Amino acid sequence: MSALDGINIAILLGALLAMAGILSSLVALRFGAPLLLIFIVVGMLAGESGPGGIHFEDVRLAFMVGSIALALILFDGGLRTRFATFQSVLAPAGTLATVGVLVTSGIVAPAAVYLFNLSWVEGLLLGAAVASTDAAAVFFLMHARGLRLRPRVAATIEVESGTNDPFAVFLTVVLVEILLHGDKPALEILLVLVRESALGTMIGIAGGVVIVAILNRVELPQGLHAPFVATGAIVTFGLCQSIHASGFLAVYLAGLIVGNRAMRARTAIVTFLDAATWLAQIAMFVLFGLLAWPQRFPEQLLPAIGIALVLMLVARPVGVFVSLVPYRFSVREKLFISWVGLRGAVGFFLASMPLLVGLKNSQIYFDVGFIVVFVSLLVQGWTIAPAARWLRIAKKRPDAFQPRIELDLPGQRAQELVGYPVTPGSPYLRGGIIPSWAKIALVVRDEKVMTPEEARGLHEGDHVYLLAPQEKASSLDRFFANLPPPSSPDPELLGDFFIGGDTTLGAIAEIYGISVDPSQQQMTVADLFGERLGRVPQSGDKQRLGEVVLVVHRVKDGQVLTVGLQLADEEEKPWAQRAMAWLRRLAG
C-alpha cells in the first residue's frame, strides 16, 4: 500500500505544481513579470533544496518533456506565422538564426574558457547552449506590457526565434559528439548540417501537408481535431529525430504549412495549442527547476553572471550587427533586436544535453545555463518594454481590445464567423470602415437577433457577427477595439484592407491618423480620384493621402467601388523626404 500511497502523493504534488504554474500566469499578466521565471522559481521551491523537499534527478525525463515542449512551442509558432510575414523577413531572420548564433557562440567561448578553465571546444559548447533566443517569452511580455512593435522588427524577431533553435541544437550536438568521440573534419560537419536541414525541410513540409489533408478529409469525432494536429506535430518531430534529421526545423515548417492552409476546426485547434504549449512550458520549467541545486550556485554564480553579461552586452549585439549588415535596419532597431534576445526554453534544453550523456564538466554547463537563463529573464525580461519605448521601436497599445468570439462553420473551411461588441471608441463605429473581405452576417441588439438590413447600421452596445476568411479574421480586432484616433498611420489597420469608394476622407483621417484639409473632409474617395486624375479611374491607379497611398481596386461604369490602403514606400516620397529619411537612418 505504501507504493500506492507514493503514487497518489506524486499525482497530487504534480497537479498542485501545474495549478501553481497556471495561477502564476495571473501574476505575470498583472505585473509584466517574465512568466518562465515564475515557473522556474516554483520548481526550485518544490525541489529538494526548497521547502517542498521533492527529490528529483531524472534528467532523461526532463529532457524528454523538454523535447516535446519545444516541438509544440515551435509548431505553434509556425502555425501563427503568415507566409507573407515569413517571406518578407526570411533573409535577415535566417542570417540571424545561423551567422548570429555562430558569432554569439564564438564570442562567449573565450569568456567560458577564461572563467571556467575549459577547453576551447568546451567553451564553444557552453556558448552554443546559450546562444538561442526564446520567442515565447518575448512576445508574452510584449502582450503583457501592451506594446506594438514596428511590423518588420516584430516579424524578424518572430521568424528568427522559430529558425535559430535548429541551428543551435545542431551546433550543440556536433560539439558534444566531438568531446565524446574526437574531432570531425569540417567538411563532414557541413555535410551533416546540409543533410539534416534538407531532410528536416522535406519532412516538415510533407508532414504539414499530410496533417491538413487528413484533418480535412477524415471525419474525426468532435473534439479530436485539435489533439490530432498536436500529435501529428510530435510524430513529425519524432520521425525526424529518429533518422537524425532536424526535427525542430521540421516541426516549425509543419506548423507554417498547417497555419497557412484552409482547415476545419481552426479555432478549436488554436485554442487547444494555446493550452498545450502553456502546460508544456510549465512542465518543462518546473522540472528543470526541480533539477537545479541552489547549493552549487554560489561557487558558479559570479563566473556565470560574467557569461550572462558577455552574452547580453557583447556577444548578442555583435552577432546581430554582423548578421544585419546587408539589410536596411536602423541602429535603434539593431540595438532593440540585440536586447530582445531573451534566453529561455532552448537554453535549459541544450544545457541539459551534456548532463544526459554524462559529459565531463556537464554540471558546469547545466548550472551556468540555468543562471544565464535566470539572469536574462530577470534583467532583459523586465526591461524590454522600457527599451522598446526608449529606442522608439514600439508604441503603447491601449489595453482596450474586445474579446473576439470565433465560430467554425460546418461544411466549409474558407471562412469563419467572428463576433464583437460594438464599443463607443471603435474605429468601425467612428467611420463605418471594415475590410471588403469581411461581411456583416447578423446583429444582436437588445437581445434580438437581426439581419444587417433589419438593424440599419450598428449602434453602441450592439454585438455584431461577421463572416471573414480564417487567416484574416483576427485582423478585425482593431476595428472593434475601443481605441482613440491614432496620431500617425497605423500599419495594423492598413496592408490588404479595402474601403468603399463612397467613404469620406474625413472618416479615413480619423481612423488612420492622416491629416486632411478641412475643406476635403466630406469628399469621397471616388471624387478624390475623379478630381485628381481628370479621367476615368482604372484599377491600379494610385493617389497619396498624407502618408497613405490609395490604390484603386475595383471600378464599375467609370465609378470607383473599392480602394486599397497602404503605407507610402520610400521611393514614392518626394526626394527631399527620402533624403531626410536616409539621414535619419544614418544617424540611427
Image (cartoon, grey):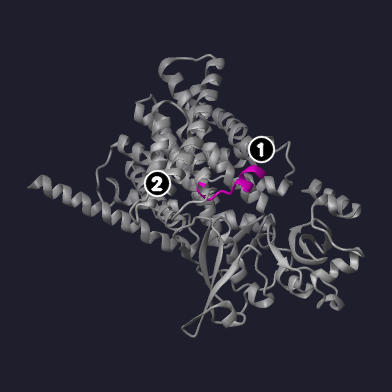
Q: Check disc 2: other Cα within 10 Å, few if <14, some if 14-19, many if 20+.
A: many
Distance in Å between CA atoms under marks 1 and 2? 29 Å
Query: In x, y percent, where is residue 163?
Result: 55, 38
Q: Is residue 539 above or below residue 114?
A: below
Amino acid at dot 1: Ala
Q: Is residue 334 left or right of residue 211?
A: right
Picture quadrant where residue 287 is located: top left
User: Residue 3 location, x and y as percent?
Assistant: 11, 45
> Disc number at residue 91?
1
Left or right of residue 120, residue 584 in this image = right
Which residue lies most toward the right here? Answer: 534
View extreme (left): residue: 1
The residue located at (55%, 43%) in the rendering is 161
Q: Residues within 10 Å of mark 1 (few under 14, many from 20)?
A: some
Residue 134 is at least partly visible in this image: no
Residue 561 vertical placement versus 313 (above, below) = below
Q: Of marks 1 and 2, which one's residue comes earlier in the chain?
A: 1
**Is there any visible trace of residue 200 in the rendered image?**
yes
Q: Tell me the magenta residue range.
A: 79-88
Looking at the rendered structure, the kind of residue marked 2 is Ala
SS of the residue at dot 1? helix
- Identify the residue at horizontal 70%, vertical 69% (top origin): 486
**Residue located beneath label 2 in the image:** 230
